[in-house]
Image (tube, helix red, strand yellow):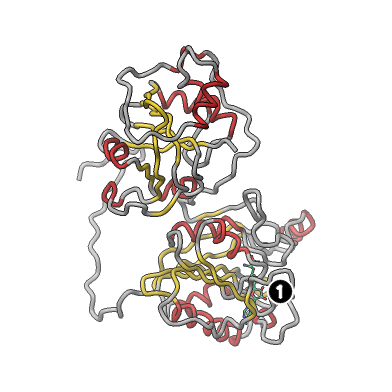
Amino acid sequence: MVRGYIFACTGASQKECFERKLFGTSKLYGAAAMRVKKNDFLFLLNLNSDLLYGVFKAVTDGRFNIKPEAWNGAYPYQVRVEPIGEIVPLKDAKKLLKKLGVGRFSVMGKATVLKILELYRPSNIPMNEWYRFLTQAEGSASLTVSSEPKSWQLFGQTQKMKEEDVEEVPQLQATTLWDFPRQSYGKTPKGDNKYAGVTPAELIWNLVWRYTEPGELVVDPMCGSGTTLDVCKEEGRKAICYDIAPPASRSDIIQNDARKIPLPDNHVDLVFVDSPYGDNIRYNEHPDCIGKISSEQERFYDELEKVIKECHRILKPGKVLGWLIGDQWVKKEFTPVGFLLYERFLKYFETVDLIMIVRRGQASHTSLWYNRARRFNFYLRGFKYLFIMRKPLLEKKENETPRVINWTYYERNNKKKVD
Ligand SMILES: C[S@@+](CC[C@H](N)C(=O)[O-])C[C@H]1O[C@@H](n2cnc3c(N)ncnc32)[C@H](O)[C@@H]1O
């Protein structure tokens, strides 16, 4: 399989890339870099000089912190590399990558990689020979860089290539409004999109990448069809997932009541929970299923508080719990399930942030229900809350002085106001 990936550096960091024969990147591109496999073709884009150095070969898969001290820890998603032959810089690299539609958010497929390899081909060698050389050559131990940058414009047409086998990698969400039109992403399914109340896989992916590193432990005590388990497997995280009634098809999900999790204290790096929101969905017939209790009853929150307490106990201090929940409006009664549960979180956790998740795939999202909502003056549920809560590092200090913020005020035209 021919694949490739573009790492980037600056004028300041290039020397270290070459000396260590190591390429690295930050969390922004981490998930793509961790998908690099041994023998993939690699290129190094110097963002300052606009040169694209090639050709390199990955001699390891993408890994976390191969050399933790490299670049003072700024680029921990790393790959060991070796050059194939003399390293040649290509001029006008950003323009080239733009024309080819290449970014750093995904690994490149065969057609694009072959196109880029062609640009490095010495003019006296035919492409098939050049390709054979590149695939068969051992990486060289020493690294020599040609002092003559090459111009890719000489090679005529360069356009976005049609790719069939490029793997889709989600991106980190930047705002507090998340909208995932599909339940899953990529080639392998995550969870079962037919499972009632299944969680969008990209939501879990975002929490996993924001709050854990490869190799760390994620727990989902109410994991339903196993979306968390499948996301974690692909992202190189360890995962332990439970449910009161695991689906028969999933032997990797442990049967357990979330109110008593069989794990030691301070053990886990991230907990994710998409709990029942009341008794609106019949998940299973298990008598201890919390989804049998109405969210109009105090007991619903008391039972979920037991789960919150367990999540707090098993999390390492400073680590995060993500919890998805929605409000209820049924037969003319509104229940602010999110707010009521949030009060319980505040007994144990501090808030990192509150995210609104656009509700999709609801049975009520039909024109019939939209018309009823307008005619009879009520609202269909349009969002859920994702509470991102942190287990405090230390007990809260009494009488802490309030923070003083020196705001920078911006004009509407984005010019900084002189203070
Ligand atoms: C919204 S679903 C979770 C969906 C899941 N994240 C997925 O993507 O498939 C809620 C789950 O909580 C489980 N559940 C309810 N009460 C439970 C309890 N006491 N202990 C553990 N799991 C429970 C249900 O069986 C159900 O699978």
Q: Is mark 1 within 8 Å of ligand 1?
A: no
Whole-percent x, y for residue 67 in the image: 32, 52
Instruction: In the rendered view, tell whether residue 354 sits above or below residue 221.
Output: above
Question: Left or right: where does residue 157 sit relative to residue 209?
Answer: right
Dot 1 falls on a residue whose secondary structure is loop
Nearest the eye: 214 or 59: 59
Whole-percent x, y for residue 398 in the image: 25, 81
Tell me the quadrant of ligand 1: bottom right
Instruction: In the rendered view, tell whether residue 230 sits above or below residue 417.
Output: below
* Residue identifier under label 1: 280
Q: Residue furthest left?
A: 419
**Label 1 is placed on what type of residue?**
Asn
Whole-percent x, y for residue 320 in the image: 43, 69
Q: Quadrant of the N terminus?
A: top right
Instruction: In the rendered view, tell whether residue 251 sits above or below residue 285.
Output: above
Q: Residues within 10 Å of mark 1 (few under 14, many from 20)?
A: some
Nearest the eye: 345 or 412: 345
Q: Residue at x 62, y 82 (%)?
A: 256
Q: Residue at x 71, y 59 (%)?
A: 193
